[in-house]
Amino acid sequence: MRRRSLLTAALAAPVATAGAVGALQSPAQAAVWSSSAQWGNWTTGAYTLYNNIWGSGAGPQTIWANSASNWGVWANHPNTGGIKSYPNVSYTLGRNVSSMGNVSSSHNITVPSGSGLAYNAAYDVWGNGHAHEIMIWTKWTSNVGPLGSFQTNVNLGGRNWGYYQGHNGSNPVYNFLAHTQTTTSTVNVTAHCQWLVNTGRMPNVRIDQIQFGWEITSSAGGYDFNCNSYSLSV
């Protein structure tokens, strides 16, 4: 699903491609599914993978997937300001916060290093359609930051987070940034949602899409972002 922002939609990307061949090919070429289309998506079971190139001034990007737990993206976005894309894996829950149950997720990712990079790895959790947005950051580069202002520190799911709150012009955004960044992470989604409701920061909304992926601002020259494993317990 397209993320909302102060920025406008990006230019369309090339048409989708798919393949399942050969030893010396890129992950995208060898994967079960791949797409370079701006809004390219693939549904497998209860999950949907989205290429989701939504920001202005974006470059080319190709998403690939073998499953909801093994997928990745190659992106070549220019070194300019503003988020260009949010490739992600998405699951729709459809339960109110007060009765959402114990929802948790784990992932292991491989992220690039080098010049011209600006990104974060984050969960994007949507309430009442796209009326409320909860972002949970687990890994990011030093040249990006959350929308809004710092409010407090909080321990949720046995981990310490910095909490920031803001508004993007369309909806409130509730941001949690891990005190300790990691590429291997387990996140208690329920704990974050219920803390927001219990502290009066967010109403008892229906949690709809739970997404995980990378918000990519720049990846000049082309870089690979890989999700080696992903699970969501609902």
Image (cartoon, rainbow, N blue to C red):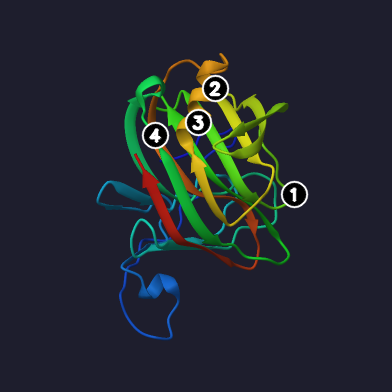
- Residue hosting label 4: 102
Q: Amino acid at mark 3?
A: Ala
| Distance from Cα at disc 1 to Cα at disc 2 | 27 Å
Which residue is rendered at x = 57% and y = 53% of the image?
A: 58
Q: Which badge, 2 or 3, comes first in the chain's sequence?
A: 3
Residue 128 vs 58, above or below: the answer is: above
Q: Which mark is residue 143?
A: 1
Element type where label 4 sits in the image: loop
Q: Which mark is residue 191?
A: 3
Q: Amino acid at mark 4?
A: Asn
Q: Which of the two residues, 61 or 223, is positioned nearer the viewer here?
A: 223
CB within 8 Å, label 2 to label 3: no
Does residue 134 appear to the left or right of 117 in the view shown? Answer: left
Q: Which badge, 1 or 3, comes first in the chain's sequence?
A: 1
Does residue 12 appear to the left or right of 119 in the view shown? Answer: left
Element type where label 3 sits in the image: helix
Does residue 33 appear to the left or right of 133 in the view shown? Answer: left
| Residue neighbourhood size for the residue with mark 2, other residues' Cα within 10 Å, grouped as few (<14), some (14–19), many (≥20) | some
Q: Which mark is residue 22?
A: none
Q: Amino acid at mark 1?
A: Asn
| Distance from Cα at disc 4 to Cα at disc 3 | 8 Å
- Residue hosting label 2: 196
| Distance from Cα at disc 2 to Cα at disc 3 | 9 Å
| Distance from Cα at disc 4 to Cα at disc 1 | 34 Å
